[in-house]
Image (spheres, rainbow, N blue to C red):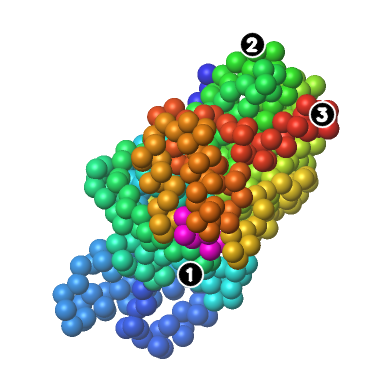
Amino acid sequence: MKKTTQRKDKIVWFGVTAVLVLFLTLAVFVPSVLAQSRESGTDDYLETFGSVFNYVYENYVDEVDPNTLFEGALSGLFESLDDPYSTYLTASDMQDLSDTTSGKFGGVGLYITKPSRSEIESNTNGASPYVRVVAPIEGTPATRAGITAGDYITKIEGESTIDLTIDEVVERLRGTPGSQVRVTLLRREKITFEVVLTRDIIEVPTIRHAMIHGSIGYLRIIQFTPYTDDKVAEAIDGFKRNGYTAVIIDVRNNPGGLLNAVVDTCDLFLSSGTIVSTRSRIPSENKVFTARRRTEVDASIPVVVLIDRGSASASEILAGAFKDRSRGYLLGEKSFGKGSVQQVKSFGAGGFKLTTSRYYTPSGINIDKIGISPDKEVKEPELTDEETESYRRLIEENLIPQFAKENPSPTGSEIDTFVMNIKKDGILLEERILKRLIRNELNKTNNNPPVFDLEFDIVLNEAVRMIEAGEVSP
């Protein structure tokens, strides 16, 4: 089996977790020298910076650690780019990134992002000043607590996240396994609730798979890691042994991962042609990634790709390639919209992450801040104001978790009775939604939860229906 490798000083990274940096303004400067620097080259800027650095270090009223000045200056450098994906990385940040790419770290299991300062100020796409949950990692404290894609983290241990950088939020959420952290969340703009998360060892999963109705191979890609393409190839072998006639690839809530991993995964399905291209002002970063002629999945096998607003970065590369190459039918809702490529460079114990190019789908489209639209939109219906209020009550009164705690293995009749009673008590949500919430709550304590949910997952059900009705062509 092939393995994706990276040099330690250069990692092409598509994960959507954005790491913003501390903003530092240097208040001491020499106006005449700075004015001269604006009209000169980079060498003069560097010389001017050195002069300012030394002046601050030698003349500030209190003694200051030169490393503090150094890190502050670098943080300000990346902050000036106004790009949430370009950031200076401290030694701790580099370790966190290494933990994430290696697939194991101590934390709560969340992929998060935060809009840039300009996006917040201009209210681009309704940008919130809070930290947004892109997706929870399956089987982690975050999923067990019911945190979902689209939630906003408004407070951590009572401290507002408005003025915190992503770096600071990550630092507060990660920690020693077994320790706890209190998080306040905002859902659907009106529902505020609090959860206490017990940190755990987070092992980043990559795929889950199973057969549906004996003939449809279901493949859920959770994140693109160096092992994803090998795991997908193994799943395909299993599908073949079971005589599969179609494949459903589910990248809902997939926040991304490594470029080579998604390219190698697409290569299992696509025969020759472009998978994705990257474009930059640096010629060496202009690349076209193409598929080989040999595939693991025969061209006669129809493919449906499920996407949602939690599908980001590398998962959008897969969706874009399948859509543009007419190899897969996209079902669900518009994806997140991250179309930039970052490289990680190390120096000393720290380093930085810098956007060096943007990626383009085979048809030449960059989906940054736009997302990929499905061929057919299928999603959960929007809740009315009355239903939202009922949803808020469910959370605030802890009704479903309490039921699950008292009934860890409820019968169908016990669930029906509980649903009937809370509806009598004024909960206006439809029965299907309530039962799915109950199922999700029960699965949080299940060490081996079902791979898929055909009872309540309307998007998956539509995919199965379309395949079995012959509405999806190879």
Cα separation, mark 2 vs mark 1, equals 50 Å
In space, the residues marked 3 and 1 are separated at their CA atoms by 45 Å
Decide if residue 57 is in sight here: yes
Rate crowding at label 3 as few (under 14), some (14 to 19) or many (20 or more) other CA atoms within 10 Å.
Answer: few
Task: Judge from the rendering whether residue 14 lies leftward or rightward of residue 346; answer left or right.
Answer: right
Residue 192, position as x, y percentages in the image = 44, 64
N-terminal of the two: label 3 or label 2? 2
Percent x, y for residue 404? 41, 40
Please say whether residue 447 is one of the residues in the magenta stretch.
no
278 vs 184, nearest the viewer? 184
* Residue 124 higher or lower than 167, as above or below: below
Look at the image and say whether residue 393 sits in the magenta stretch.
yes
Which circle marks residue 469 in the picture?
A: 3
Task: Locate residue 423 relative to residue 178 in the image: left or right.
Answer: right
In the rendered view, tell whether residue 169 sits above or below residue 213: below
Marks 2 & 1, CB-CB < 8 Å contact: no
Front residue of this view, candidates 412 and 91 = 412
Pointer 1 residue: 129
Q: Point out the residue furthest to the top here.
A: 241
Q: Which residues are magenta?
A: 388-394
Give the mark, 2 or 1, whose residue is nearer the N terminus: 1
Inspect the image, locate mark 2, and give the three-letter code of the amino acid beneath it: Arg
In front: label 3 or label 1: 3
Circle nearer the viewer, 3 or 2:
3
* Distance in Å between CA atoms under marks 3 and 2: 23 Å
Does residue 298 lie above or below 27 as drawn? Answer: above
What is the secondary structure assignment of the residue under circle 2? helix
Q: Main secondary structure of the magenta part?
A: helix
Would you name the residue on which mark 2 appears? 241
- Of labels 3 and 1, earlier in sequence is 1
Type of amino acid at the residue the image marks with label 3 = Ala
Q: Quadrant of residue 219?
A: top right
